[in-house]
Image (tube, grey):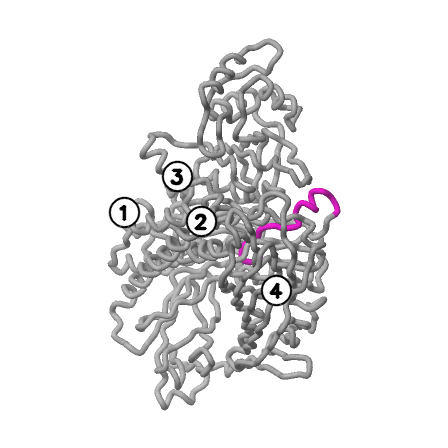
Amino acid sequence: MWVEPDTNMAGGEALIRQLLHGKRYYREVLGVDSVILWLPDTFGYTAALPQILKGCGVKYLVTQKIFWSYNEGDEFPCHYFTWQGMDGSEIVSFLPTSYTYKTDPKEINTVWKNRRQLRDLDAFLLPYGYGDGGGGPSRDYVEYARRQEDLEGGARVKMAGPLEFFTDMEKAGGPKHTYAGELYFSAHRGTYTSQAMIKQKNRKGELALREMEMWSCLAEAEGWQYPLEKADGLWKTLLLHQFHDILPGSSIARVYVEAREAMEKLLQEAGGIREDALRAILNQSREEEAVTVFNSLSFARKALVTLPDAFARGACLADGTVLPVEHTFEGLKTLVELPSCGGVSLRPASADQAGRKPADGAAEEAVILRTQDGFILENGQVRAVVNNHGEVTSFVLKESGREFAAKPMNCFHMYKDVPRFFDAWDIDSNYRQQEIAGAFDIEVEELGQGVEAVLLVTGRIGESSYRQYIRLAKESRRLVFETEADWQELHRLLKVSFPVDVHAENGINEMQFGYVERPTHRSRPYDKDRFEVCNHRYSALCDGAHGAAVLNDCKYGISMNGNSLELTLLRAAAGPEMRADNGRHHFTYAFTAWEGTFAGCDVVRQGYEVNVAPLTVCGGGRDFSLLSVGQDDIFTDTLKPAEDGSGDWILRLYEAKKAARRTCVQLARKDVRAFACDMLENTLQEIPVEDGKIMLDFRAFEVKTVRLVSGRA
């Protein structure tokens, strides 16, 4: 890979780019095709990785840290095995127990004698030398290994490269054991939360590069020149900061000073390229007062957008429909329906248009009712009760009348957090026995209603203060908590809990290109290990009839305890940076619920919507949709210019709900040829295209990469 990255929090596309750029470097600079992923110190491995490795031409994995179990726990069963990912892809793997082995007889023989896997293992891969710090092997290491090549009474030693090791093992029959699912690391759980700034910049950076690439594709089709070399450099900046001691938050203070500067520059420059591309798309428009709202998501959505003052009378669509505009404390807002991977132009309504209404009539607005104990936020779909502490004491879906709140939700919990060993790295399971006072001095006030019902909550937690905007938009089932915190704690852990009236033995945590199920109970060591886990945009609890989820825009750590989803918001480690994370933070999380099965719910879409806001750009044009996908659980993760500078488009899609599907991808461009390719963009075979339609068959959680070529021969 480009660096030795974290693989829990880095996005799926970013992991592909780690391999794309890393393998390209090996090929161009060293003249080899690297087929081994060597990540000795990374803190656990997503179950999406085997598919990504196979898609990038990698055959083998070597790591070692999974065997660290200094807090007890369920010991990993194998060293040499076939690792099966969540989609069924398989990678041959070997896990030693260290990356700093010595080679003296005592070490060699002890390692062999104490190996975890005693059966079906006739050889052991032993990385030796001063590994933690890059010193490598010394003369003594080499001499000891040579002396024990065939020493009576000791394990026989062969000095070779790891590729030779795997080749020899395959000749002997290959691995006899298979391990399915993620390689969960039962330590370093604090790395999902420590140094919140870099985690937020990572999420925003991944999304900024996604937007940059998608709109650059359309702009190139209009004759604009994509700055491929500059974009390449921006990706490498992001990949560098996904290094397994930067993104996890386990580096010294200076690293984060430099990381903040580098990531803010990345966001600015990626945004600049995106804006140039959007202006190129609208370059023929002279409608100075018009605006175009762009949606990069691969499904149609309704979204609140803020408009200039010229839209005070309303926003007019291309067909003459006038959308009502509301004056809010944040400016003029309207609710607009946006097409998949496309845009809609809005023009200020004239005086005679202002009285017109949408053809379907005005949707029921979001309102706030004051009660003795708090507030009721209500629209056509949801009735939510917020008490005077800012907690949600009731959340009812109107379609069924079902109550989802088992206890007050959006409840802050503060814990003493002093791990036994690695401060920034770890959260110890006994934090739950060390809860201290949570929020106090809380005030709640109403800020507005109509297109959106908004409450402002202010209060204190420990030595810190916070402000929170609780939002319910009309026509939405999502209650949003936009939060600002001035965090001034030391050795403290802050969580927010959502106890729901749903019984589930396993929770669902989103990860790259799908999700993983993890226990909500603590019955066995395996279950107890997972008291803190990683998620991406959502985590959910559901049964066969209904469910609920907590969404987020930059948080990765979460615990699931019985019927409670408990999102980890902030930590306050004292090492390697003293008072890490002290300062101002801005983050958003949300709550939603649904009736029916998980397969039929829209939680994946809602997770995307919380993270990806529509883009509003000055200038008008034609309404358009680049592409649409026929199945609700198939998502376009990436649309990008090809790496070879050919002008081709690379389309990456995945199945998100663990369901094999056949779907139609409808392209706006009819003069196009399509080719299935690997994740490195190498063409495999042509896919039939008929009138812009491509039919694709997906396995559960499968990722597909398609090269789109203009209709030239």
Give how far apart the Cα atoms at labels 1 and 3 are: 32 Å
Rendered image quadrant of residue 269 = bottom left
What is the x, y in percent for residue 322?
41, 82
Q: Which mark is residue 462?
A: 4
Q: Secondary structure at mark 3?
A: helix
Discs 1, 3 touching: Cβ within 8 Å: no
Give how far apart the Cα atoms at labels 1 and 4 are: 67 Å
Frontmost residue, 582 versus 493: 582
Q: Which mark is residue 713?
A: 1
Residue at image mark 3: 22
- The local crowd at label 1, few if under 14, some if 14 to 19, many if 20 or more residues have their Cα within 10 Å, is few
Q: Which residues are magenta?
A: 523-538
Q: Amino acid at mark 2?
A: Glu
Give how far apart the Cα atoms at labels 4 and 3 are: 45 Å
What residue lies at 33% left-to-right and 48% top-to-bottom? 232
Q: Amino acid at mark 4?
A: Gly
Q: Amino acid at mark 3?
A: Gly
Relative to residue 509, is residue 262 drawn left or right? Answer: left
Please identify, in this view, whether the residue under mark 1 or under mark 3 is nearer the observer. 3
Q: Amino acid at mark 1?
A: Ala
Please identify, in this view, whether the residue under mark 4 or under mark 2 is nearer the observer. 4
Whether residue 272 can be seen here: yes
Residue at image mark 2: 13
Whether residue 544 can be seen here: no
- Which mark sits nearer the N-terminus, 1 or 3? 3
Vertical comparison of 446 with 634: above or below: below
- Which mark sits nearer the N-terminus, 2 or 1? 2
What residue lies at 29% left-to-right and 51% top-to-bottom? 230
